[in-house]
Amino acid sequence: MKITIRVSALVYPTEIEEKVREAITNLFPVELQIRDFGTPQLYGEGDLESLRLLHRRLREERILDTARNILIKGISGDTTQFRLNKQVAFAGKLNFPAGVESLGSIFVEISAGDEDSLLRIIDWLVPETIDGKPVGEIEL
C-alpha cells in the first residue's frame, strides 16, 4: 500500500520559523524544507511511519470520533485533507480548527493508491467507536 503524507504551514512575519517547525514535527516526524511563494512555507513529506505519532496522540486525547468525521469529510478520491491548529500543535496536542485561523494552520494531506486503501488508513488511524472506545483496531 503506497501512502504519502504531506504537511505544510505558512510562517508569518510575526512567527518564529523554528517554533512553526517544532509545531509540525511534534505531530509529524518529517524532514521539513522551506519554500517561499511570497510568504515562507515549511513543507515535508512522509509515509505511514509519519502517522504513528498522530495515531497515538488521537487515542491519548480521546478524540477519535471528531477526527474520524473530519478525515472522512476531507476525502476526495484517494486523498483526505485536514487542518490542525499550529499553536496547539506546538504544545504537542491536537486541535482541528473550525474555521480560518489568523496565524494559519498546519495543512495535512494523506494520499493512498486508491480509495479503498485510503479508507483502510482512516480505519487504522481513527477507527469507529462505541462510547468513545475503538470498536476494533487494525494493524498497518
Image (tube, grey):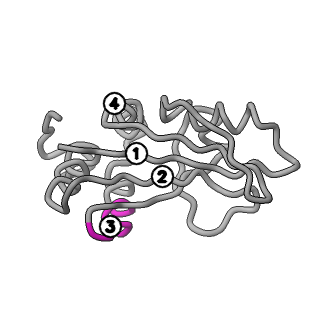
Q: Earlier in the sequence, mark 1 or mark 3?
A: 1
Residue designated by label 3:
75
Mark 2, Cα crowd under 10 Å, few <14 / some 14-19 / many 20+, is: some
The segment highlighted magenta reads: 69-77
SS at badge 4: helix
Q: Residue at x 56, y 66 (%)?
A: 98
Cα gap from disc 2 to disc 4, whole angstroms = 15 Å
Cα gap from disc 2 to disc 1, whole angstroms = 7 Å
Q: Which mark is residue 55?
A: none
Magenta run includes residue 59? no
Q: Earlier in the sequence, mark 4 or mark 1?
A: 1
The amino acid pointed to by label 1 is: Ile
Residue 27 drawn at (x, y percent): 50, 35
Q: Which mark is residue 5?
A: 1
Check contact, mark 2 vs mark 4: CB within 8 A: no
Residue 100 drawn at (x, y percent): 65, 68
Check contact, mark 2 vs mark 1: CB within 8 A: yes
Cα gap from disc 2 to disc 3, whole angstroms = 12 Å
Cα gap from disc 1 to disc 3, whole angstroms = 14 Å
Q: Earlier in the sequence, mark 2 or mark 3?
A: 3
SS at badge 1: strand
Residue designated by label 2:
108
Q: Which mark is residue 49?
A: 4
Q: Residue at x 23, y 55 (%)?
A: 118
Q: Earlier in the sequence, mark 2 or mark 4?
A: 4
The amino acid pointed to by label 3 is: Ile
Cα gap from disc 4 to disc 1, whole angstroms = 9 Å
Q: Relative to 90, is 135 on the left or the right?
A: left
Which quarter of the image is occupied by the C terminus?
A: top left
- Give the label, 1 or 3, closer to the camera: 1
Q: Residue at x 68, y 41 (%)?
A: 34
